[in-house]
Structures are given as C-alpha cells and as structure tokens.
Image (spheres, coloured by chain):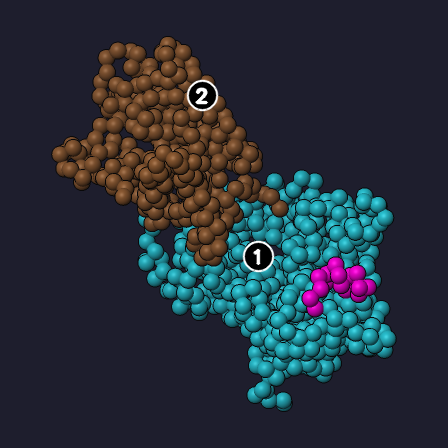
Chain colours: A cyan, B brown
Amino acid sequence: MENKVVTVSMKNITKRFGEIIANDSVNLDIYKGEILALLGENGSGKTTLMNMLSGIYYPDEGQIFINNEEKVIASPRDAFELGIGMVHQHFKLVDVLTATENIVLGLDGKLDLKKASAKIREICRKYGFDVDPDQKVYDMSVSEKQTVEIVKVLYRGADILILDEPTAVLTPQETDRLFAILRNMKEDGKSIIIITHKMHEVLSISDRVAVLRKGTYVGDLRTKETTAQEMTEMMVGHAVELNIERPDPVDPKPRIEVKNLTVRNEEGILKLEDVSFTANSGEILGIAGISGCGQKELLEAIAGLQPAESGSVCYIEDDGSKDELLKKDPRQIQEMGVTLSFVPEDRLGMGLVGNMDMSDNMMLRSFRKGPTPFTDRKSPRKLAKKVVKDLDVVTPGISTPVRRLSGGNVQKVLVGREIASAPKVLLTAYAVRGLDINSSYTIYDLINRQKKAGVAVIYVGEDLDVLLEISDRILVMCGGKVSGIIDGRTATKNKVGMMMTRIGGEGFDEQ
Amino acid sequence: MIDLVSFIPRAVVQGIPLLYGSTGETLTEKAGNLNLGIPGVMYVGAISGVIGSFFYEQSGEINGFLAIAIPLLCSLAGSLIMGLIYCFLTVTLRANQNVTGLAMTTFGIGFGNFFGGSLIKLAGSDVPSIALSKTSAYFSHALPFADKLGWFGKIFLSYGFLAYASIAIALVTSRIIRHTRVGLHLRAVGESPTTADAAGINVTRYKYFATCIGCMIAGLGGLYYVMDYACGVWSNDAFGDRGWLAIALVIFTIWRPSIGIFASILFGGLYILYLFIPTGMDHMEIKELYKMIPYVVTLVVLVITSIRSKRENQPPASLGLAYFREER
C-alpha cells in the first residue's frame, strides 16, 4: 500500500451495554484520503464503534489515536475539534429550524445567519451539493436532509467523515449523486468511513473494506481484490449462497383483484388513481416505484386500513367466489375467513409494540381467541420460542422488549408472527429495509417459502436488483398510477427505472 | 359602556402575574421541560418575599433600597430552590415531569400556606391576613406624573416597577430565544435533545438554567401579586388559580413571550370583566358565568392551536420527555 498516512487509529476498543458486549477489543486504522467501507451484520457493533469515534459513546477500554497522538473523545464537541464528523442513520436535525440554523447548531460565537448561509453556499458549490440554506428541515425530502447533515459536518471543517447507512433512504439516482460528492471529498484529501449493507455500493465506492462480526474485528480487504461473496462470508463467518431463487409458480389462480382503485389521503391529495391489477396465488407480485408513489396506500387499502374513494378490492376464493374487502376493517376481514398478513414498512409503529416483549407481540394476533375472557398466554409464548428458533432471532430472551432488538431481528419477529397464521395473502412493504445481507436473504427465503405454499405475495421493494430477481411479475407505479405490469424474468433494471419516472416508460429505447 | 380608563389599568395589574408566570414557563418549556409546578413556584415566590419583608418590617427602621431588595432576593431565592428541586428530579433523576410538576404545585401551596399561617400567628392580627404596607408602598410606587397626565398617566404610568420589569423581561426573553445563539441552542434542546447533544450542546446544563431562570421569573409574578397588586396583604389561598392560567397562556401565546405581553393583559381583562358588565341585581348568577370567560377562552384556544398545523406553532417536540444519551 503506497505511502499511506494513518489519520485515525482505534486500539483495543471495548464497549459494553449492560451484559451485551457491543465491541470487543477492536483495532481499526483509517488512512488519509480513502473511502473505507465498514461491513458487518446488524448488531455487529459498527454503529457503536463509530459513535465512540464521534463522541456519542465513551469506550470502556482502549485508546484512540488521531494523527498518532492519543486523544480522549468525551463528547461530540471533542470530536468536531479533532475534525471528526458523523452523519447518523437517523438524522440529527431539528425539524422546525432552517438548514442554516441546524448547521450552525452547537458552535460558538455571535449568531450571524447571513454569514453562515454564505459559507454554506460556498461549501455547496465546492462539492456539488444542492441545498437551500433558508429552507425549513420539515419541508425537505430525505435526501435533502442528508445533504444538510453532510454540509453540517463539512461546515465544521471535518477531515474524517463517518456516514452510517447513507443510502438506505435514497433512490438510485440520489445515491449516484451522493457517491459523486464523496469522490470529490476524497480528492480533497478527506477520509470517509461508510457503513452500508449494499454490496454493489461497497464495490463501487470504497477503496478498502473492514469487517466486523459480533463485535469483533475480523479483518480488512482491498476492494479491488475482493468480491461480494468473499466479503459476505467474512461478515457471516461461513459460506453463504448469494442467489435468490425464483421457483416457477405452481398452479397460479387469481386471489386478489383490484379494480379502478382510487384513494385520497387525509389532506385530500390523490394517492392512488384508477389502479387495477390481479395478484395470483403461488406468485410474487413485485411493486416498484419511487417511494411515496402510493405503494403504502395500496397495501393499506387491501389490508383494510385505508378508506378508498372508489373502486374495488376483491378476495377470490379457490372456487371463484368473490368477497369485497373495501370498507371493512382488518377484524371484519379476518372474520370473513380471509387470512391476510401485512408486514408494514413502519415495523415498530404499525407492526409491533416496541415496549412489549415478543410473546405479547405474538398475542396481538390471537388475543381475541379462546372461550374465556382471560387471554391465553401459553400459545403466544410457544410461538415466540418457535420464531426465535426457526428464524435465528438474536435476543437475550423472549421477554425482552422488541425495541431493544436490532432492525433485522425486529423484522424477523414481525415476519415470523405474520406467516405463523398461515396466510393466503402476504403483503410486505420494504421487508429488508435496513437489514444486513444475511438477514435479507433469510427474509427472501421466508417469502419464497410462502410463495411455494401457494400464498399470493405482494412485495413492495426499493432495491431494483432484488425486485428483478425475486418477482414473477413486477407492477411499476408512477405517481399513484399503474405505469405497467411486466414479467419479472425478462424485465431489465433500465426499463423498470424508466417506467418509475414516466407512465408506461414512454421514450424508452429498447436496445 | 365599560369605563376604559378604569378598566385597562385593572386589566394590566391582573395580567402582570400571568405575564411573569407565562414568560417563565415558556423559557422552561423551550428547554423541553413541562413544569406544571409553576403555580407552586409562584406561590413560593410570593411567600418567600413576604417572609423577607415581614422580618425586615419587624426590625424597625425602613430604608427604601432594602425594602425592595430584601423581599426581591428572598423571592428569587425561594423560586430558585423550587426550580433546582424540579430539575434535580426530572433532569438528573429523569422522573416523570407531569408527576413532579403536580407534586411541586401541591408542595408549593402547602409551603406557602404553612408559613403564611405562621406569620399571621406571629403578627397576632385579628383577621386571617398580614399587611406589609410599609414595604409594599415601595413596590407599588407609580412613575412620576402618573396622576397629572389624566387618562394617559392612568393607563401607562400608574404601575409599580415590577410591572414594567415584567414587560422588559418578556421582550428580552423573546429576543434571546429568537435571535441569539443561546436561544437557538435552547430551542434545539427542547425540540430534539439527541440532535443538540450530537451537536455538542450540554443538554443538562441548558435544561437546568432555563428551568431555574424560568422559575425565578415566575416567582416574581407571585411577589408582584402580594406586594403590589394586593398592597402587601397576604392571606392564604388568595393567589387562586393564576398559576394555571399562566401555563394556559403559554399555549395561547404559541410559546412567544412578546405575544404574552398582550395576551396576559387580555386575560387579565377577561378575569375581571364580570365586575364591569352591568347585570343588575336580579341576575347575580350571570356574573358567575362571566367569571368563566378566561377558562372558556383557554379551552377554545387549545382547540384552535391544535387544529392549526403550522409546525412553528407546535409545542417543542420533546416537551415532557426526559433525555438519556445512552438509551438504545
């Protein structure tokens, strides 16, 4: 490695949360002017490690050297002063303040917002950001918020940038723009640490990869000399198969028929317009679209959570008889004998109760059953144990509140509960958002198993590569309308991308 | 027709304690602390001033400077201690803010009535109250020319110095919150302590300072009530529900002390409106209905502010929540 200068060196870092060891004697070096990808499964301690570098947590043991000098980083302020800035996965912005006010937050001296916004414009010009310093944060899109976060770090003159899953919420185009900016910053001599789960991003952006597994440091690799397969195996600790299988649908029959569905949200804005399609049993219908194009409303309308303005949603029995699902709440749908499972995008908001433990969460589905007014606590507990065992949920025990679990494990609990009722229809929204690669594949596998059992699966996803691999058919949405339904086996990423931005993907040149 | 020249000054003197209370509470809430102990704090502020003044009057010789300084310092000290207790419980020990606040109110009123009762015993008066007219005279001393300039003097110059101080404090607080770095940090702490913390702002320190200073400001409202409005007469429970109205005013003013100046005078006016509306002797019960007006207005305002969706006018996002950095 040609004359590299170490800027940050973390030595024997250990951090415990109660009985859980989040980091166990980790050694990590970061060089000047490189992009380092930090890899690891959910709960492997990547974020904890980076939080110690940015002063949020304080290590229990170990030392941190900045430019070969031992430093104590006791607070985020110490980190700024050492030129370390972190963009957190959950943005740390105050919604009611403007971009400028957020950026100067925590600095000293007289408050001069005009001078500050001039400096912000200067930074934006230098690296190619697009942000309005006077805009309020609550008016911003996710990618704009992220830009504000990055500018905030640069405004403080950071030389070492830490980005925690920056692409999890971005569209492919926004990701490309972000990566271009990161490369600009690297040219400028800044060191960048990026935490991500998406292998193709690691391969395209990083110079070096460092891998953590269960809180310990496994090793590092040069990106040029490695493959997604090798990195994943290092992360997981054993060989894994990185292909999503797509068995042919067996005996598909129409199961859910949506006709001319139109939905307005509470503010009266049209979210779905004249949507029609049929989902078949034993088949995965993928739904692609830029986020906020009506995917959420569509699933919620089918699940009985979203009132529709017009149209119909029919459940079709095996014998061909139809039952209308609109204007019924989830309980009525359940009483009709339609077993419909919904894995919503907001796991801890709609799917599970964060403060309740696993068995209580299992009970949310079954508490009405039973002959006595007393609830049956035994079978939910049994189910919770089964889910832990079958899906390898990492948890201190089934009586731990689910909000304490990592994202991937929360999702396993939710999916486990939903498929336990042996559904006929499975609706999933962003089932693998924020999950590491291993957990993602577990979820894909679970979904495929449901498909093989004859369930009609509707899979709303954001990663086009996965959608193209897993779906039998792909319904592309664009601004609340159906842009088109195409066969998953022959579709290309380009075609779907075009259809996402224009109805029917007109103007797309099939090469 | 209401006689405005006598109505407005009375509305103002009714409004000043509310203004102190709501300015103090706004400052506290901006740091994310919902201090429902404000009625208790104002009560303690009042009785502390009364205790100081009582013993000073007992000592004999009265000097103008000390007659103001002693009750003022006693009042500030009393409400500061209340603020520190509240902060220690809610910020350091992360106790529930609602429960703590309500307990502080109960405690403050009990504290006030206990010492108030003791002083009344000590003074050995025939009525269940004590009058501190000598020190009170310094507090309610009006500006010069107040009685020479006709209606203008009556409406604008006829108040004691604490009334003018309350308006100055409200304006300064408003300015600090909106236009200084300290204010920006304070708002950040109240909106999102995690963000503030990550930005290197000392959340605990801001919460302590804002709450304690807020309590001291609110305590002055109690002092003004006894020393100026009530002419130095303390009787138990006379302060009434003004503390709760002050908290309601915070919502009414959408967390802006400068609006509070007008809002508190308006509420002061509503509070005494029943005295100025002629009802005749046949329908005395209608007067009781007029007394409800401030509370009805508060309810209506609550409904209206909840409907209004503008984000700037909402309460600080983390209001009422304790902050713990390492919570996962």
Is B54 drawn above or below residue A389 in the view shown?
above
Is A236 drawn above or below residue B112 in the view shown?
below
Q: Name the spot of residue A462 as percent of width and height, x first.
A: 64, 69
Q: How many numbered marks have been drawn onto this rendered protein structure?
A: 2
Q: Name the spot of residue B276 as percent of width and height, x first.
A: 31, 38
Question: Label 1 neighbourhood size at 10 Å, few (<14), some (14-19), many (20+)?
Answer: some
Q: Quadrant of the N terminus of chain A?
A: bottom right
Residue A454 lies in quadrant: bottom right
Front residue of B318/A260: it is: A260
SS assignment at label 1: loop
Q: Which segment did they paint magenta?
A: A326-343
Amino acid of disc 1? Gln
Q: Name the spot of residue B226 as percent of width and height, x first.
A: 34, 26
The answer to whether A111 appears left or right of B303 in the picture is left
User: Residue at position x 48%, y 50% from top?
Assistant: B303
SS assignment at label 2: helix
Label 1, on which residue? A89
Q: Quadrant of the C terminus of chain A?
A: bottom right
Question: Label 2 neighbourhood size at 10 Å, few (<14), some (14-19), many (20+)?
Answer: some
Of all chains, the one bearing label 1 is: A
Of all chains, the one bearing label 2 is: B
Front residue of A486/B37: it is: B37
Residue A413 lies in quadrant: bottom right
The answer to whether A483 appears left or right of B46 in the picture is right
Label 2, on which residue? B113
The answer to whether any part of residue B214 appears in the image is: no
Amino acid of disc 2? Asn
> Marks 2 and 1: same chain?
no
The answer to whether B155 appears left or right of A488 in the picture is left
Is A126 drawn above or below residue A364 in the view shown?
below
User: Residue at position x 42%, y 58% from top?
Assistant: A98
As for residue A446 lying within the magenta part, the answer is no
